[in-house]
Amino acid sequence: MFLDDRTPSFETWLERKLDGIAPGIRHDVEHWARLLHDGGPRSQPRDEATVWNYLNRIRPVLIDWSSRYDHLREVTRDDVLAQLDALHGGQRQHTLIVLRSLFSRAKKNGTIFKNPTSRIRVGQREHGIIQPLEPEHIENSVAAVTQPADRLVLALAAVHAARSGAIRRLQLDDLDIGNRKLTVDGRVRPLDELTLQVAREWLDFRRRRWPDTANPHLLINKITALGTGSISQVSLTAPLRGQAASLEQFRVDRQLEEALVHGPDPLHLAEVFGLDEKTAMRYADSARRLLERPVESGSDFRDTSKMASCSRTGGIGRQKSHRDAP
């Protein structure tokens, strides 16, 4: 039998991040980080990347407090506000959310008497106007995808506004070519001609390359074909690395285009893409503000939306015809 005695990467990372923090503060932070990572009787384990982001966000704050305090119970509300006053926007909100999680856990464990983050308002984040992608950025990203799987991924993001996690979770049964339907995270969508074309191309390639794989996922590679897991996030986004338009930007642009073409109606956006009400209202508000620009600017945005749509749908098709040309 094989005994894997290697030290997990999380342990070495945690030890490195806790270095320099006062012992009393370190004890509470380590317990909190391990609970996030491993879970507990009444809490589910978080994704490892979430733990990384949380601790990386507040480490400078903890280092600063360690120069003055030995325990978290010495930290006051004014200390928290002083740290937050030096931050703005999303950084301030994220830092407060993480500190609130840390102090709430310490309060439950009985290592602090009072939570200094109580009654500090996170506030509503102000969002700017979502802008449509530039046509040249779209064309460059479309030209960068050359493999069948990458073209299908791009179509799913640019046409169906599918998130990367939803794309990775797609199963073979979610693609119903006979009835021309696609199920993305439980929502059934009609299968357009472009997605149907690149899906058939990918399925033909998959059948030839891995005829005996037992992996039920729609997208697989040489690693996951040997098992039943999904492809990694890196495998999904690597083809567009360095491009001005990423998969996430294609997804956002598709939803904005829907609001520009069919009108800034949040109910319509929520129905089409399954958005929550706040997100749908944000897209509708951005579309409304773009359409209310002066006539010259408004026409430019409408033309940009149409050009983006043509680039998304036509570019992949042109690539296929060029590759298959004799």
Image (cartoon, rainbow, N blue to C red):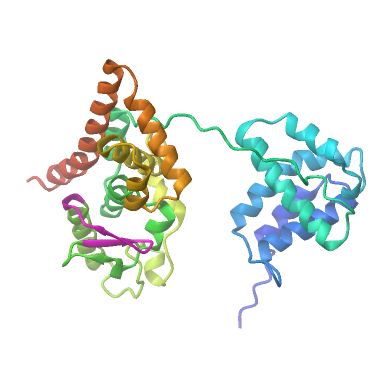
Residue 278 place in picture, x, y as percent = 48, 44
Q: Nearer the viewer, residue 26 or 113?
A: 113
- The quarter of the picture where residue 201 lies is bottom left
Residue 132 place in picture, x, y as percent = 35, 31
- The quarter of the picture where residue 144 lies is top left
Taking the spot 67% from the left edge, 40% from the top edge, the residue there is 122
Taking the spot 43% from the left edge, 68% from the top edge, the residue there is 229
Taking the spot 40% from the left edge, 66% from the top edge, the residue there is 224
Taking the spot 62% from the left edge, 60% from the top edge, the residue there is 46
Q: In the image, is 168 to the left or to the right of 107? A: left
* Residue 120 lies in the magenta-colored region: no
Q: Magenta residues? A: 181-194
Q: Is 240 above or below relative to 37?
A: above
* Residue 189 lies in the magenta-colored region: yes
- The quarter of the picture where residue 253 lies is top left
Residue 239 place in picture, x, y as percent = 36, 45
Q: Quadrant of the N terminus?
A: bottom right
Residue 105 place in picture, x, y as percent = 77, 58
Q: Is 111 above or below relative to 270?
A: below
Q: How many marks?
A: 0
Q: Which residue reaches farthest bottom?
A: 1
Q: Nearer the viewer, residue 281 or 250?
A: 281
Q: Is 16 above or below relative to 86?
A: below
